[in-house]
Amino acid sequence: MRIVLIAAAGIVLLILVVLVTGSLLPKRHVASRSASYRATPEHLFSLIAGPQNWRPDVLRYEAVPDANGRELMRETTRGGEIITYELLDRVPARSLKRRIATENLPYSGTWTYSLQPNGEGTVVRITEDGQVYNPVFRFMSRFVLGHTRAMDSYLRALGKATGQEVEIKD
């Protein structure tokens, strides 16, 4: 019986540590990652700005009508998550900025893609300006998942779409 009580106390203590630590972390974060590609900015921009069927984690990608004239895109992931994004800014072959338009998620924010010619190739940088509202999810995204995990996956998938392995950099 004593072992059960000690185990239960340990679990409660762990939950409290996660909650308190998550509550003390800032809600907002900015993270950035980049990779170099042997491809033109125009080609990479067409992939980033267009349908996302080249990404292995996206099951479905569709334009969503909006009464206010916003350009919205909805992604359905293979895990069943459905998220709508709003296009905020687009400068062909140079930059693109999207915002999560889906409400009531435990997170929100923007991704800004910048494309810089670099010799025979292009450097793509993604900057995430995000907010994580739930303290448990904030703890997980900071210490377990990492703020750059989704960006790293995206940059690697972009590499595969262009037939190359890429090295991710800060």
Image: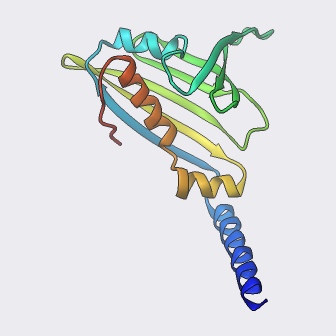
Q: Nearer the viewer, residue 26 or 83?
A: 83
Vertical relation: 76 (above or below) 70: below
Identify the image quadrant of residue 25. Answer: bottom right
Residue lying farthest to the left in this orientation: 119
Q: Is residue 133 above or below residue 89?
A: below
Residue shown at the point (52%, 46%) measured from the top left: 147
Left or right: 20, with 144 as reference point: right
**Colour scheme in use:** rainbow
Q: For residue 70, which quarter of the picture?
A: top right
Q: Which residue occupies 63% across, 27% down?
A: 77
Query: Which percent across, then down, holds residue 145?
Result: 54, 50
Estimate the x, y position of residue 51 in percent, counting from the top left.
55, 11
* Quadrant location of the N terminus in the rendered image: bottom right
Judge from the rendering whether residue 138 lies leftward or rightward of residue 143; answer left or right.
Answer: right
Q: Is residue 80 left or right of residue 153?
A: right
Q: Residue at x 75, y 8 (%)?
A: 65
- Residue 113 visible in the shown view: yes
Q: Is residue 133 above or below residue 130?
A: below
Question: Is residue 71 visible to us here?
Answer: no
List x then y, in percent, for residue 42. Answer: 37, 9
Q: Horizontal and vertical percent for residue 143?
A: 53, 58
Front-most of 2 and 22?
A: 2
The single residue placed furthest to the front in the displayed view is: 1
Q: Quadrant of the C terminus?
A: top left
Question: Relative to residue 75, is residue 46 depicted above or below?
Answer: above
Q: Using residue 76 as the reference point, say whether residue 121 is left or right of it.
A: left
Number of numbered tags placed on the structure image: 0
